[in-house]
Amino acid sequence: AQSVAQPEDQVNVAEGNPLTVKCTYSVSGNPYLFWYVQYPNRGLQFLLKYITGDNLVKGSYGFEAEFNKSQTSFHLKKPSALVSDSALYFCAVRDGRGSTLGRLYFGRGTQLTVWP
Amino acid sequence: NAGVTQTPKFRVLKTGQSMTLLCAQDMNHEYMYWYRQDPGMGLRLIHYSVGEGTTAKGEVPDGYNVSRLKKQNFLLGLESAAPSQTSVYFCASSYRLSGSGDTQYFGPGTRLTVL
């Protein structure tokens, strides 16, 4: 069965400091991994995804994520946080097998707050 | 190019009333999805569609029905609303499944309250 865990409900960081939002996953086959961001009263916006290849994936707004197969993790990172990065972040996983027809399994979300 | 749009944005229902949520996409996507978002629970898939005229159940389908009569539209119906269906509903769409992995694009959401 596919599942995603975001172990931190909330992450607080000072502006200018590096940030990390953690995600671990469980899938039967090869994982396709995604990060989405949700600003207040808005829909989810795609940030980045890992399908195959380089373990370090770069995405929108200066975010990047590192795929670690041995630790089954896909942590979201940014070298220098901005107050405008404050939002709800979701990790999602899809099994690479065709039988799951593109269904995504989402984590519960991590609220990121960046203090000025 | 509007992407994924949802109507209405807000709605308040009384228990037992019915309503239909409309999702439209202009990206010629094959796949469409309905999710609900509840605090602390992430997004859960209600129903999805892999093409015009086809639908399938997701993780939490009970109390909902869907239809995909046109490729660009995906309707979510509540026949007899219950307070447990108070939630924020998101529609999403993606291209036909491919080896590179599909990104789902989300609408702005519908906030539904059932009294």
Image (spheres, grey):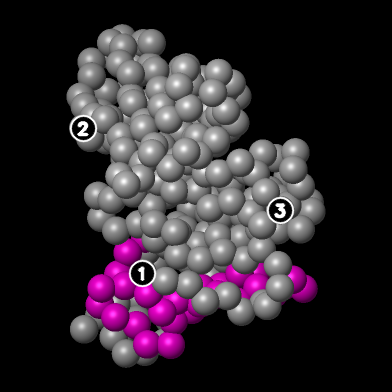
Q: Which residue is mark 3?
A: B99
Q: Which residue is mark 2?
A: B10
**Residue B108 part of the magenta-drawn span:** no
- The answer to whether marks 1 and 3 mark residues whose Cβ atoms lie closer than 8 Å is no
Q: Is the residue B52 above or below the residue B31 in the image?
A: above
- Give, as a three-letter code, the residue at label 1: Leu
> In this image, B99 relative to B48: left or right?
right
Q: Which residue is mark 1?
A: A112
Residue displayed at 39% across by 67% down: A10
In which quadrant is the C terminus of chain B drawn?
top left
Disc 3 is attached to a residue of which chain?
A: B
In percent of width and height, residue A33 lies at 61, 60
Residue B35 seen: no
**Real-space CA distance between mark 1 and mark 3, rounded to the nearest whole angstrom:** 32 Å
Q: Are marks 1 and 2 on the same chain?
A: no
Quarter occupied by residue B73: top left
Residue displayed at 46% across by 33% down: B34
The residues colored magenta run A61-88
Residue at disc 2, secondary structure = strand
Residue B33 seen: yes
Q: Are marks 2 and 3 on the same chain?
A: yes
In percent of width and height, residue A104 lies at 58, 46
